[in-house]
Amino acid sequence: MGSIISGVIFLTVGLIIRVYPNILAGYNSLSQKERENAEMNRLPFFGFLLFTVMGVISLLSYVLSIWFESPKLSSEVTLIVTLTGLIFAVVGGNLLISNRFTK
């Protein structure tokens, strides 16, 4: 049940980021150059995509745990998805803010 709740929360956060990108942590405090880099490198889309993928994987883990008859599978996968998503968010966000990938 926890993986369903986590999946729905991740999907909701992803959709909110898509509509309101200013809720990203530190987005409002960026300098003008960093904000331009972030927008040019599509940081809000990255946040939306990251949280959406995390939500879908969490929801699929619940279905797979029922299919494989292993109730611990969904909680383990949700924990791994959360930790991996955290790493991707920090590293990917910093790269998209500080570097200029597109012209």
Image (cartoon, rainbow, N blue to C red):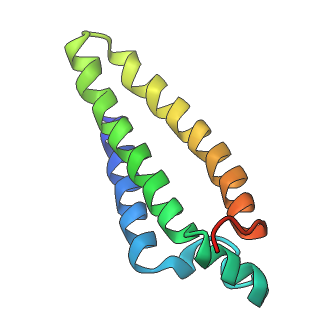
Can you tell which quarter of the image residue 74 is in? top left
Task: Give the vertical position of 89 relative to 54 (above or below).
Answer: below
Q: Is residue 19 toward the left or the right of residue 84 in the image?
A: left
Can you tell which quarter of the image residue 67 is in? top left
Residue 94 at what x, y percent from top left? 74, 60
Task: Give the vertical position of 23 relative to 62 (above or below).
Answer: below
Residue 46 at what x, y percent from top left? 52, 60
Q: Nearer the viewer, residue 43 or 70?
A: 43
- In which quadrant of the rendered image does the N terminus lie? top left
- In which quadrant of the rendered image does the C terminus lie? bottom right
Please report the residue visible at 52 percent of the width from the left and 70 percent of the height from the top: 44
Residue 29 at what x, y percent from top left? 75, 84
Task: Give the vertical position of 23 relative to 32 (above or below).
Answer: above
Q: Is residue 71 toward the left or the right of residue 25 in the image?
A: left
Please report the residue visible at 60 percent of the width from the left and 76 percent of the height from the top: 40
Please report the residue visible at 29 percent of the width from the left and 19 percent of the height from the top: 65
Residue 28 at what x, y percent from top left? 67, 85
